[in-house]
Every structure is written in structure tokens, then in C-alpha cells.
Image: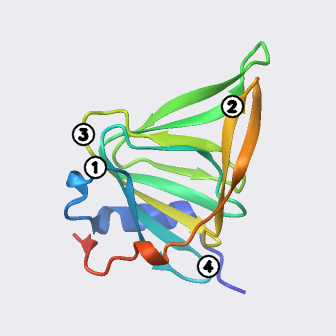
Amino acid sequence: MPPRIDPCDLARHLAPALHWPGAGAVREREWRLIAHTEAFDAWLIAWPPGGTVALHDHGPSQGALSVIAGTLVEAVPWRDDTGRLALRRREVGVGTTLGFRAGHVHDVTNESGTHALSLHVYTPALTEMTLFELRADRLVARGVQPADGADRRAPGAIALR
């Protein structure tokens, strides 16, 4: 059995040491798998202005998101006082780490005019993401997408500060 990992603790520990030369030049959201073990994996994501990932969960994995540069906005489905399903938004700035349990549904967007960089840690390692949409006051699954980072490993693309 793999060791128990706290994704928030790991993200807070790793994030200050990470830097991605060239991340500020990406035109579409890009990601790199920077660590993969039986117990966890870690992904560095570069976000251009307007970069987004639609509503999704992380399958059976719990996780953490840590902002290294810029500001991101997380939107989470919730029911308001009238029972209407809406998205509750919150800004996530540099140095902030958000933790979430398996099954947590959210979207993440860079709404600012500058690039952002974030670290995402999942335990157990990320294997799938379920994509969702809000439809007629319901959260509807659109499908499951496998998470395979093998094509996104880029030796030398990530540096420690």
C-alpha cells in the first residue's frame, strides 16, 4: 500500500521551488506532469489570459491547487437560498493552496490579463476526470476523460528556483 500523502502539504512544500521558463508565453493552457508515484502525482499548469478548464472532477483522487504566479478563479456548483443551481466563484491568488476531496466539481479560469502558473497535486495519482455541465438547474456528467500525462512530460522544461 502506498504511503498516505496530504496533497495540500505537498503542494505548499513544492510550489515555492518551482518555475517554468517560458510559461508566460503559452497561448493555450498547457500542463506538465512533474512527478508521478504510486501515491501521488503533481502537475504544473500554465494559464494564459482567458485560459480555462470546464467543470470537472478528479475521479477518485483528492487534490490541491496552489497558485505560483498570477490569479485564478475557481467556480463551484452550489444551490442558493431559492434552490437554484449556480456557480460560486472565488479568486485564488499567489501563495494560496486550495484542498479538495474526491468528487469535488469545479472549473478554473484565468480571468486576468496576465499569465498564471499553478501546481496541482492528486492522491492517489490522477487517472480520470469527469466533465460536467449545468443544464436546466442540474449538474450533468458529459463523459469521463482519462488522465494520461505521458505525452506531457517535458524533461528540462521545469526548473527549481
Instruction: Give the image location of residue 136, x and y in percent.
Output: 76, 23
Residue farthest to the front? 142
- Per the model, the C-alpha gap separating discs 2 and 4 is 32 Å
Rounded to the nearest angstrom, the CA distance separating label 1 from label 4 is 32 Å
| Front of the two marks 4 and 3 | 3
**Residue 139 makes an appearance in the image:** yes
In the displayed structure, does residue 153 sit left or right of residue 54? left
The Cα–Cα distance between marks 4 and 3, rounded to whole angstroms, is 34 Å
Q: Quadrant of the C terminus?
A: bottom left
> Of callouts 1 and 4, which one flags the residue occurring earlier in the amino acid sequence?
1
Tag 3 secondary structure: loop
Say the numbered circle drawn on residue 4: none
Q: Residues within 10 Å of mark 1 (few under 14, many from 20)?
A: some
Q: Which residue is mark 2?
A: 134
Q: Residue at x 61, y 28 (%)?
A: 87
Q: Tag 3 or tag 1, which sits nearer the N-term? A: 1
Q: Earlier in the sequence, mark 1 or mark 2?
A: 1
Q: Which amino acid, mark 4? A: Ala
Q: Provide the residue designation for mark 4.
A: 39
Nearer the observer, 68 or 27: 27
Residue 114 is tagged as 3
Disc 3 residue type (three-letter): Thr
Q: Residue at x 35, y 40 (%)?
A: 71
Kindly identify which residue carries mark 1.
27
Horizontal arrangement in the rendering, residue 121 relative to residue 125 (left or right):
left
Q: Secondary structure at mark 2?
A: strand
In which quarter of the view is residue 33 placed?
bottom left
Q: Earlier in the sequence, mark 2 or mark 4?
A: 4
Task: Give how far across and how far down residue 37 sits, in percent.
Answer: 55, 83
Viewer-side label of 1, 4: 1
